[in-house]
Amino acid sequence: MEKVISLNHIAHSFGVETVIKDINIEIDKGVIFGLLGPSGSGKTTLVKIITGILHPTEGSSVVQDTQMPSLKQMKNIGFMAQSDALYVELTAYENIDYFASIYGLPRSERKQRIKKVLEIVDLVKHMKKPVHTFSGGMKRRLSLAISIVHEPEILILDEPTVGIDPLLRQSIWQEFNKLKSEGTTIIVTTHVMDEAEKCDELALLHDGYVIAQGSPKDLKQSIHVDTMEQAFLHYGGGKS
Amino acid sequence: MNSISIIVRILRQFRRDKRSLALMFAAPLLVLTLMWLVLDSGDYVPEIAAVDLPDRFVEILENEAEVMSLDRHEAEDALKNQEIDAVLEWEENKPALTLEGSDPTASGAVNMALQQTLNQMNPQQEQMEPEIHYYHGSEEIKLFDNIGPVLIGFFIFFFVFIVGGVSFIRERTQGTLERSLATPLKRWEIVIGYLGGFGLFTIIQSIIIAAYSIYALDVFMAGNFLYVLLVTFLLALSALSLGTLLSAFAKNEFQMIQFIPLVIVPQVFFSGMFNLETLDPWLRAIGNIMPLTYGAEALRDIMIRGSAFGSFAVEVFVLFGFTLLFTLLNIVALKRHRKL
């Protein structure tokens, strides 16, 4: 299978604190790859390294055969940060429009494409409202819409479904699967076990290390447990 | 160019944030009006050049002012270079006074000194009426006219600094800067976009403030209105670039506000609103690193002295240089958020 992302011996520290220690991950095209770990395990830092915002202290990250950071590859990446990075004075439509124009969507296409992503996240009837009137869940959905507006080949989502109700979570995951079937590679961080189950491949992060990697089924079978939670506790407990 | 996207976005944000708009437009007008209402003058020892005056007259005058004896040519040069406040000569048996004229405090003090000297010389006799000329301005210049140009410059600088700096820091606290840096946006495109978006507003702001001061408050205005706009616009750009640069060193809006006493207030003292003649030269030199010093000097040149472009060209280039420097530093400072 075609490798889309490869992380080689990545380590990163903020000052004296080392957050990520020697991580090696390869991600195939068209899979949903989950980064599972408790808060403080280095998920967000790792995700920022993949997007190219952070330059790792050690190691290299290669996205689609290009050494990161690369502005050219950033165009192929969609990113949804953990906190909603939105301009609260602007309407939902204007927020998407801003990012769409930065990604270079031609004006003629932009309008249709914005409508389309608003439909996906079910915000069409709120598109003219300023974002400061939005609930937490609506902001999450808007952030998601922004991350997919330029139809990226790689979609990176940092805790995408926090604060989103189960019904909408389900429909968002349906959308992930649809994007995946169109060839999009999706990387998603989570600390929710049932969400981890939905990924094709998982890396379990603990204290800056990958403590286990594989499909959810393999991870469970190799240690003879029934749930991801048990698997996580097993691997996490075994190491620390 | 991606900077255009940022400019469009900033304009839209302004449209929905009426309060910040009001801060940029209405607040300077309000404060200027208040200053205009309360201003009053203080004590000042004038410097007067004496050209061929009777010795006894000079002796008495020295009690009231700093007097130096110069020939006519030297005196004129000194007046032109603003080294002295007035030249006093003797014409047809009565004193002829030429005032520098741009500082009404100084002009008033010179007049007072002359009157008292004349009184002491001939206490009994009828008052000699001195002939008074103005090198710049006219007797109508009041204190507010003198510091008016400085105030115009100051308020533009102050409010643009605040609005620009706080907007840029909000990009960081709300995560949109990082989010924007996860796109193919280049660092310079962000900085230029900011200058462009706010720059459009500062043009409007400059027009409103300058027009209000000159036509509504009737501040003395001898020069070209377009020159005033040019200088205020450049001053605003330097404030904007300085504000966004310093916001890189603040963690939140509150820390940004803390820059006001450090960066803004000293500029008030050194920009010429207060007379710095009594200050040590090396202390006075502090003003040379402050954008407002140059903006205020250029505005005074235009509004009071009615100068042509040549006489404030240096100030214009220095302001432009400040903007360029702060902008480049800001592009480098953004490296903290993304190396590329």
Image: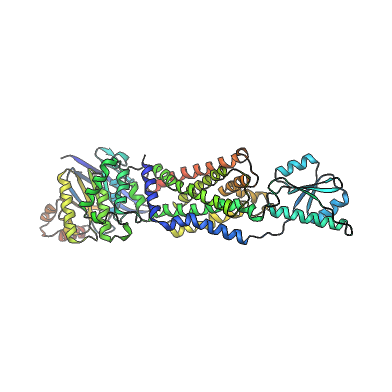
Q: Is residue A229 above or below residue B290?
A: below
Q: Is residue A206 visible?
A: no
Q: Residue at x 77, y 43 (%)?
A: B75
Q: Position of residue A31 (x, y in %)?
A: 17, 46
Residue lying furthest front: B215
- Name the residue furthest right: B124
- Which one is in front, B311 or B218? B218
**Left or right of B66: which side holds A63?**
left
Is B85 positioned to the left or the right of B169 in the image?
right
Q: Quadrant of the C terminus of chain A?
A: bottom left
Quadrant location, the N terminus of chain A: top left
* A168 relative position to B92: left or right: left
How many numbered marks does the figure carry? 0
Indicate the quadrant where residue B251 lies.
bottom left
Residue A142 location in percent, x, y? 27, 54
Asked whether A15 or A119 is in front, the reply is A119
Give the color scheme: rainbow, by chain, secondary structure or one colour: rainbow
Q: Position of residue B168 (x, y in %)?
A: 42, 52
Residue A105: percent from left, percent from top: 28, 41
Q: Is residue A97 visible?
A: yes
Residue drawn at point x = 65 percent, y = 49 percent: B282
